Amino acid sequence: MSEKTGIVTLVGAGPGDPDLLTIGAARALNRADVVVYDNLVCPEVLEFAAGAELIDVGKLPFGKQTAQETINGILVREGSLGRNVVRLKGGDPFIYGRGTEEIEALHCAGVPFRVIPGVTSLNGVLGAAGVALTTRGRNRGFAVFSGAGATSTSEFRRWAEYPGPVVIYMGVNRAADITAEFLAAGRDQNEPVVVVARGGTPRETIAESTLAELPDLIANPAEWTPAIIVIGAAREYAFKARPLDGRIAVFNAGSLDSAAADELRALGAKPARGVAHEPAHPFAREVAVPTEAHK
């Protein structure tokens, strides 16, 4: 191990919108020598780590995968070299972020670490979408589970028995099984469902449905990943329509001007840099915004 003592900081980057990055996260990125980041991290967030080495260990749905053991090894290696390492994770490190596995690896290797929590999709995305999980006199609580890793569909029925809203992470691929078990448990087929795909990003899509219609709504999982699903809670409110709601403002190559980006967000647009890497979702529309250098 290097004579210089390094440290690995697990940082929650929030659900995608850079406005939801915490002050502590921004400070940690500013001091970082190296940033090990996930695919769900917004590119704008990485600009806080100007000059740091960037290591992409993202896991793409239906695409590139980086084994967790490989990620653990990178963190131990970089921390052992005496570097100030930021492990940047979408959402919060300890809410389906595998943060526990990474700190266990660091602890076993004797590498110091600390954690800066992040805003998770549960509140950052759903709140912005108008979904209130608790309402006085109506919902006193809610349940949360992951659709990934279930060894039997009967696991879903246990969650269906919860008498209130149920939030599902990583459930797109199991939507048909989840729906079947919820209906078998006696949930109302007309119960409201809200699906938020790619929440907080330029490609955010919000759809409302009923429990019975959920499998048909997300019949093509690739179009809806990643997503958070809420069964039993409707959109209580919707923000007043703004001129650029539902549009993606695509900047030309180069640095995205922060002042212009802020103005566009205020108008309802989702700023994005360069040309989109993926086909636009049917609900997404793009508007090109030239930078000063390209006017």
Image (tube, rainbow, N blue to C red):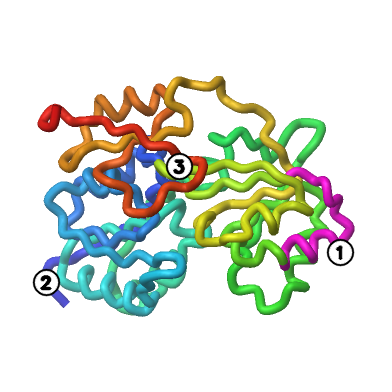
Q: Is residue 18 left or right of residue 228?
A: left
Q: Residue at x 38, y 73 (%)?
A: 65
Which range of residues does the magenta coloring cover?
177-192
Mark 2: which secondary structure? Answer: loop
Q: Earlier in the sequence, mark 3 or mark 1?
A: 1
Q: Please rate how many residues cluster around mark 1, counting C-alpha atoms within 10 Å: few if below 14, some from 14 to 19, many from 20.
A: few
Q: Nearer the viewer, residue 51 or 245?
A: 245
Q: Which residue is mark 2?
A: 3
Residue 275 within the magenta-colored segment of the rendering: no
User: Which tag is nearer the camera, tag 3 or tag 2?
Assistant: 3
Q: Quadrant of the C terminus?
A: top left
| Residue 165 vertical placement versus 127 (above, below) | below
Image quadrant in which you'd find residue 134: top right
Q: Is residue 32 left or right of residue 132?
A: left
Q: Quadrant of the N terminus?
A: bottom left
Furthest-right residue in this view:
186
Q: How many numbered circles are shown?
A: 3
Q: Return the x and y of residue 36 as percentages of the image width and height.
A: 27, 62
Q: Which residue is mark 3?
A: 200
Q: Please rate how many residues cluster around mark 2, counting C-alpha atoms within 10 Å: few if below 14, some from 14 to 19, many from 20.
A: few
Q: Is residue 242 left or right of residue 72?
A: right
Q: Return the x and y of residue 219 as percentages of the image width and height.
A: 63, 60
- The amino acid pointed to by label 1 is Ala
Q: Which residue is mark 1?
A: 184
The answer, for residue 258, to whether it is visible in the render is yes
- The amino acid pointed to by label 3 is Gly
The answer, for residue 114, to whether it is visible in the render is no
Q: Nearer the viewer, residue 166 or 23?
A: 166
